[in-house]
Amino acid sequence: MMDIVGQMRAYGITPVPPEARRLGVLDTFVLWADLGVSFLVMVVGMFLVPGLSLAEALVAILVGAVLGNLLLGLTATIGSDTGVPTMVLFRPVLGLRGSFAPTVLNVLQLVGWATFEIIVMAQAATLLSQRLLGVGGYLGWVLFFSLLTTGMAVGGPVLIVKQWMEKFAVWAVLFTLLWVTVAVLATYDLRVLFAKPGTGEMSFWLAVDLVAVMPISWVPLVADYSRFARNRRGAFWGTGAGYFVSHVWFYALGTVLGLSAAVTMDPNAPIAPLLAAIGGLTAGWAALLILLVAETDEGFANIYSAAVSTQNLLPRAGQRTLALVFGGICFALAAMIPLVQYESFLLLIGSVFIPLLGILTADYFVLRERRYDLEALYRSEGQYWYRNGVNWTAMVVWVGGVVLYLAIAGLPQLGLAGLAPWLGATLPSFFFGSVAYAILSKVVTRGGLLGATEAMKR
């Protein structure tokens, strides 16, 4: 019992000590493989067709998954090196006060994700209860899943991984995924689906963006979990490979279901047809029930990280108190709003965090040679204070990267066409952020960053 209580300790935004980093490579793999199991992942797979053919969509899934999970795993190593959450990692890059900007944006996207997850779980539970009991009770299910995911967030990642995911969730999900995959292959003629040409409404590289943005949407919170990893190697491979497996698997299933006649795709209401299609498979309603239980992990992760991220703004606020507050906010939102404009939501996340990730990797791996002064992360007027707490060089590059991403990809659901969606926005905006920041930080700051690095070496 004392061991479990120890796992539940909240470290806030302070570095997790080495003796408390209890997640090995298998633990981390299970965590991220389970976080990749989501109905919302399948929905994005459905967006890729019929604009692309099935073969083109599957290639886009592989390319996007490699790019996105490589960047996810890379960021996880920074968290394991330092033991601090992701929003604190932006302090050396943007300044102690400058890190407040991505923190606010991250909290907003996490609340959005958690709300989406609760909506999806409530809709799935409503379908199941109507079929099995003849009663829907959507708002009751919204309340139930809000309470459940909030309770998990209060427990924390080590407890949830070791006591829930590894002992039950991962095995139930693996069996269910195999069952659903076999049922899909037995129900639909893949030769017929592969023979269907794409309509051309979706470009290949825009599809890659939509695939890559799913793991990248986890980048702003990946260090919240990799800070508990025992070593850098386990953080990289456990995170990147774990999410890659379920990421590709669910995207592919969503693409096949989206291309079949079983699902009539409505971008503004994509979940209900997908849930009905899964339920229509052999033993599909039982599979839907198990996948519904596994979906709680995503809601937990988003509420937990919303609390941890907020501590970058309010370090004295209790992590568990914040988790309860965000759980209540997500309940209210899920009870009142529909699931709409999902594709544009994903592209907005990509536009904000991909160039910022480029800046972070250039700063940590190139300019500072994998050395951050952990004490200076929490000290005003130190080397990460810059000008009144803000590194304006990084801020300017970040804004430029956001503009570049949106100019290339656009926001199709909002009627904003991209200038070059065929090019793909992920790699250009990432490399713009990293290269522009590496160059400008030397020119504009007149050697300030390099001087700080030399001081750390001494």
Image (spheres, rainbow, N blue to C red):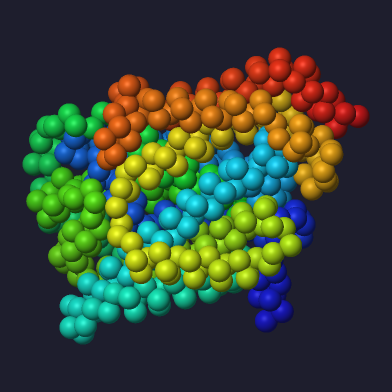
Quadrant in the picture for residue 187? bottom left
Is 278 drawn above or below residue 223 in the view shown? Answer: below
The residue that appears at 40% across and 64% down in the rendered structure is 333
Q: Nearer the viewer, residue 335 or 232?
A: 335
Q: Give percent across and percent down for residue 239.
A: 53, 48
Is there any visible trace of residue 238 in the rendered image?
Answer: no
Q: Quadrant of residue 182?
A: bottom left
Lateral position of residue 190 relative to residue 47, left or right? left
Q: Residue furthest right?
A: 458
Q: Residue at x 37, y 25 (%)?
A: 408
Left or right of 285: which side holds 211? Answer: right
Is any part of residue 203 visible from this angle?
A: yes
x 72%, y 58%: residue = 315
Identify the residue shown where x is 20% and y is 78%: 130
User: In the rendering, at what x and y percent does residue 452 appear?
Assistant: 82, 28
- Please say if 266 is above or below 69: below
Q: Is residue 307 above or below residue 223?
A: below
Q: Quadrant of residue 211?
A: top left
Residue 365 on image: x %, y %: 67, 30
What percent of the width, then of the height, locates residue 290? 33, 70
